[in-house]
Image (spheres, rainbow, N blue to C red):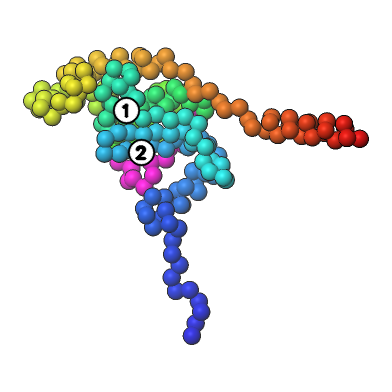
Amino acid sequence: MSKDKTYEPKFKRRRQGKTNYAKRLALVKSKKTIVVVRKTTTHIIAHAVKYNPKGDETTAMANSKELNNFSFYGTNNTPSAYLTGYLLGKRMNEKEAILDIGRRSPSHGSVVFACLKGLIDAGVKIPHSAEAIPSEDRINGSVLAEYAKTNKDKFASYEKAGVKIEELPTAFAKAKTEIDKVKPTEKKAKKETKKVEVKEEIKKDEATKE
């Protein structure tokens, strides 16, 4: 009987549909900061990540829930995605990155590319196709405001949050101005300094014993 393997199971995260390892390898090889953008059923989440063999390091992050702090109702639509990307871009110290949209199929005009546009406008250089970016009237909420004129009952959550849906473009512009005041995330101090200090203490102890 042959002992050769007839089937080799894929990595767990690949079986769960969470990670495409071919794309993951390409992102790591770029040696750039990876901007991870994910859309949930209610929000947009974005992280700036640096590869580390022991585990990726998040250097900055933003969640559309935070937009409430800028007088904007943050959800998972196009204006929220743009502002989330803009907020992350302002927090990032790195100004060159590459986009990771996970296993989501890229679709021109989708919210992940609205987030990308926000990052670019915040000063982060990311390779992209201009055709993938949503139109300006979709990004600033004009399309939603127009749609709401005959479907206002579908935007009750905006009213509860204190944002008038018909004035969404104005609220968008105001939130963007407020986000401009955000400063980059402070870099963490390197832990190597402590190791050096410990070695110096050991040397002192050994010298005292002599």
Of residues 44 and 208, the one nearer the viewer is 208
Instruction: Please provide percent x and percent y for residue 35.
Output: 44, 35
Please name the residue shown 38% across and 50% down the image: 18
Amino acid tagged 2: Arg
Residue 126 visible in this rendered orientation of the protein: no
With respect to residue 25, does 112 lie above or below? above
Residue 138, quarter of the rendered image: top left
The residue lying furthest to the front in this view is 209
Sequence order check, earlier mark of 1 and 2: 2
Circle number at residue 65: 1
Please name the residue shown 51% across and 41% down the image: 56
Instruction: Characterize the local packing of mark 2: few (<14), some (14-19) or many (20 or more) Cα atoms within 10 angstroms.
Output: many
With respect to residue 12, does 194 lie above or below? above
Please name the residue shown 10% across and 27% down the image: 153
Residue 132, quarter of the rendered image: top left
> Is residue 106 part of the magenta span, yes or no?
yes
Of residues 59 and 78, the one nearer the viewer is 59
> Is residue 94 part of the magenta span, yes or no?
no
With respect to residue 26, does 34 lie above or below? above
Instruction: Please provide percent x and percent y for residue 2.
Output: 49, 82
How far apart marks 1 and 2 lie (CA) works out to 13 Å
Q: Which residue is mark 2?
A: 38
Q: Tell whether 195 sits left or right of 79.
A: right
Q: Tell whether 163 sits left or right of 99.
A: left
